[in-house]
Image (cartoon, rainbow, N blue to C red):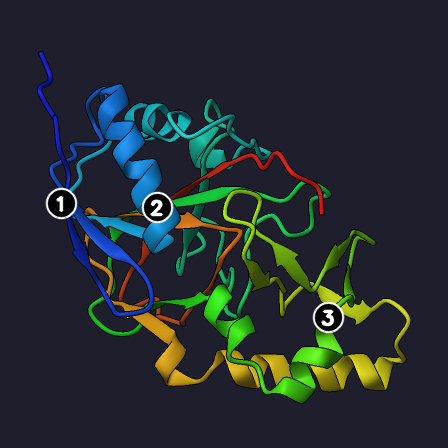
Amino acid sequence: MHTQSKIMIRPLTSFLGAEIEGVDASKKITPDILAQLNSTLIEHQLLVLRHQNLSVEQQIAFSRNFGEMEQFSPHPHYLNYPEIFPVSNREEDGYPNVGHYWHHDGSFLETPTSLSLFYFLKAPLQGGDFLFNNMYHAYESLPETLKKQVEGLETIHRNGVVHSLVRKHPITGRKALYINMGLTVGIVGLSHQQSVGIIRDLNRHLNHPEYVYHHKLQVGDLIICDNASVAHFATYADPQYPQLQRRTTVSGTVKF
């Protein structure tokens, strides 16, 4: 019988993230543990569970605790598991060259992805850090002129989906920036030049080192990311240093 009762929480930075101890994601978790994880995720926005050892089935089962799962066209390595989106710096292991820019997963959906869970099976010796940005802070710390510019604006994705550039979090109600630097092609009502200028200024703002949490990957890391309030950026790792993650995502429930 599994007897988990209380998680241990260690903040990763003063502005984002917490490392969680006392949770074995390979086992069924209790309602009390799940409630603690959910409340800690709302407070810290990003959770890191180290030293996990998960089969595909166990990762999917753990992810389902947080809501309905999104599905993808199955990768050849995971034909029976459409919930798995494998990402690697080696094409033979997973999808390469994914997410090397600030973004929120599933921003191209009309009802965007709620949570992203990243499980790392291979971690590179050099490079490949995952960067995370607290988008509440990113919005609140904008220069006043830029903050006034972005209020009420809507971004246009390549597939035509439109989202507010400043969104209210569906649970906390706090305002946060919400942008995908790789898929955004314009801003509603602005010229191409004006759109490019604002997007460039926002990207520069997100790159301020005081706002960015650098996560050095370790094999067995399981990261749970609140997609509504956190943007992430996968840095490059040379294929001679293999990297492989299995990503699962939880469907959103709120259009905005």
Q: Quadrant of the N terminus?
A: top left
Q: Secondary structure at mark 3?
A: loop
To which quarter of the image does residue 8 belong? top left
To which quarter of the image does residue 198 belong? bottom right
Residue under the point 91% across and 71% down: 189
Q: Secondary structure at mark 1?
A: loop
Residues under numbered marks 2 and 3 in contact, where contact means CB atoms less than 8 Å apart? no
Please give the residue where the numbered disc 2 appears in the rendered image: 41
Q: Give the vertical position of 194 relative to 83 (above or below).
A: below
To which quarter of the image does residue 52 belong? top left
Residues under numbered marks 2 and 1 in contact, where contact means CB atoms less than 8 Å apart? no
Please give the residue where the numbered disc 3 appears in the rendered image: 151
Residue under the point 74% across and 80% down: 149
Between tags 2 and 1, which lies in front? 2
Q: Give the vertical position of 178 relative to 112 (above or below).
A: below
Q: Earlier in the sequence, mark 1 or mark 3?
A: 1
Q: Amino acid at mark 1?
A: His
Please give the residue where the numbered disc 1 appears in the rendered image: 51
The residues bearing labels 2 and 3 have C-alpha atoms spaced at a distance of: 26 Å
Nearest the camera: 229 or 159? 229
Nearest the camera: 96 or 6? 6
Q: Amino acid at mark 3?
A: Glu
* Mark 2 closeness class: few <14, some 14–19, many ≥20 residues within 10 Å: some
160 vs 98, left or right, is right
* Mark 3 closeness class: few <14, some 14–19, many ≥20 residues within 10 Å: few
Residue under the point 67% across and 84% down: 146
